[in-house]
Image (cartoon, rainbow, N blue to C red):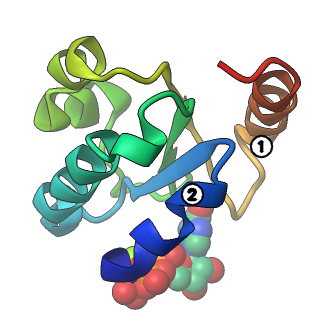
Amino acid sequence: MGPIWPSYYGDCSAVLFMIDAANPTQISSSCIQLLSLLSAEQLASVSVLILFNKIDLPCCMSLVEMKSLFRMQDIVSCASQPITMVETSARDGTGLPDVLQWLQATLRDPS
Ligand SMILES: Nc1nc2c(ncn2[C@@H]2O[C@H](COP(=O)(O)OP(=O)(O)OP(=O)(O)O)[C@@H](O)[C@H]2O)c(=O)[nH]1
Ligand SMILES: [Mg+2]
């Protein structure tokens, strides 16, 4: 669906970017999608929450591994948007309270 994401950018108040932490083969394409999203003019001041999902699976990558593979430190320091990261499991609910809290705070005080 990546090619049609930009048609929604104009109405965006916050971005949740979900990465499948159990799928190392998608890391590079996911990273390119993220960089393209972060460089979109319409999203220049929209807060971004990156969700590392599927952390309940035994084969998932660790947060340290994923941050290093994505070069997250470089991405965060070059991006114009505030970027937050959270580990989640849509299956067992891990991290979901943090996601809701972030959404509430972000939509209350838009940057
Ligand atoms: N174990 C686990 N499974 C999940 C989680 N989130 C989604 N799924 C499962 O993942 C499957 C969907 O695959 P996703 O990778 O989320 O969706 P997708 O990327 O559109 O599909 P693929 O192209 O097959 O990867 C469904 O069976 C979901 O139940 C999670 O946090 N943990
Ligand atoms: Mg998938």
Residue 9: percent from the left, percent from the top? 52, 58
Vertical comparison of 55 with 82: above or below: below
Mark 1 lies on a secondary structure that is helix
Quadrant of the drawing holding the C terminus? top right
* Relative side of 107 to 7, left or right: right
Q: Residue at x 26, y 41 (%)?
A: 39
> How many marks are shown on the rendered structure?
2
Q: Residues within 10 Å of mark 2 (few under 14, many from 20)?
A: few
Q: Residue furthest top?
A: 77
Vertical comparison of 53 with 86: above or below: below
Q: Residue at x 11, y 57 (%)?
A: 28
Vertical comparison of 23 with 69: above or below: below
Q: Residue 75 versus residue 21: which sits nearer the camera?
A: 75
Q: Residue 97 versus residue 81: which sits nearer the camera?
A: 81
Q: Earlier in the sequence, mark 2 or mark 1?
A: 2
Amino acid carrying label 2: it is Gly
Q: Is label 1 within 8 A of ligand 1 (CB to nearest ligand atom)?
A: no
Quadrant of the drawing holding the N terminus? bottom left
Q: Residue 86 versus residue 14: which sits nearer the camera?
A: 14
Q: Is residue 55 visible?
A: no
Q: Residue at x 32, y 47 (%)?
A: 40
Residue 57: percent from the left, percent from the top? 48, 59
Query: Label 2: which residue?
Result: 10
Query: Label 1: which residue?
Result: 96
Q: Residue at x 33, y 50 (%)?
A: 37
